[in-house]
Amino acid sequence: MGLGCDSGRAPFPGLLALSALVSHSVWENEPMSPEVSDLLKRALALSVDERAALANTLLDSLETTSQSVQEAWDEEVARRMEDLKAGRAVTVPWEQLHRELLAMVNERWARGAHSAT
């Protein structure tokens, strides 16, 4: 099974975060070393699945969660899985969630654009 985003599920949250970081203007002001620039060029040449795995691994390496925080997340995941199995949770297909999120962003943007004029 691949790591791609064509399964109807949400893409890796880490990829979204990494994409936001890389595209953020702060990066434009910080010159990359030749080594980092070469590494980025090589990483971008990887397949989607390989880039996803690399991005998640890099993001995981930045996390400094304590054991108690990790245990709390593990318990929360187990609770949510149990809720799903017992029919106490409602799931939403990625396509629907994506449409709803875009609508929310567009609405906020429209309100912000109108209030600036």
Image (tube, rainbow, N blue to C red):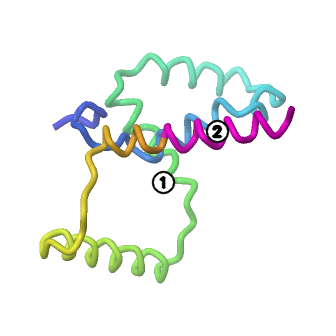
Asked if labels 2 and 1 touch by Cβ distance under 8 angstroms, the answer is no
Of callouts 1 and 2, the N-terminal one: 2
Report the label total.
2
Residue located farthest toward the right when viewing the structure as drawn? 117
Q: Position of residue 14 (x, y in %)?
A: 47, 46
Amino acid type at circle 2 is Leu
Viewer-proximal residue, 23 or 70?
23
Tell me: residue 50, above or below residue 61.
above
Label 2 environment density (alpha carbons within 10 Å; few <14, some 14–19, many ≥20):
few
Which image quadrant for residue 5?
top left
In space, the residues marked 1 and 2 are separated at their CA atoms by 15 Å
* Depicted 9 relative to depicted 46: above or below: below
**Disc ID at residue 4:** none
Q: Residue at x 28, y 52 (%)?
A: 92
Vertical comparison of 109 with 82: above or below: above
Residue closest to the eye, 86 or 60: 86
- The residue that label 1 is drawn on is 60
Dot 2: what SS?
helix
Q: Residues within 10 Å of mark 1 (few under 14, many from 20)?
A: few
Magenta part of the chain: 102-117
Q: Specify the amino acid type for callout 1.
A: Asp
| Quarter assignment of residue 97 | top left
Query: Image quadrant for the N terminus?
Result: top left
Q: Tell me which residue sits at (31%, 38%) in the image.
A: 95
Viewer-side label of 1, 2: 2
Q: Residue at x 57, y 24 (%)?
A: 40
The residue carrying mark 2 is 21
**Quadrant of the drawing holding the C terminus:** top right
> Where is residue 36 drawn, in percent x and y?
65, 27
Give the side of residue 90 with respect to residue 72, left or right: left
Q: Is residue 65 left or right of residue 10?
A: right
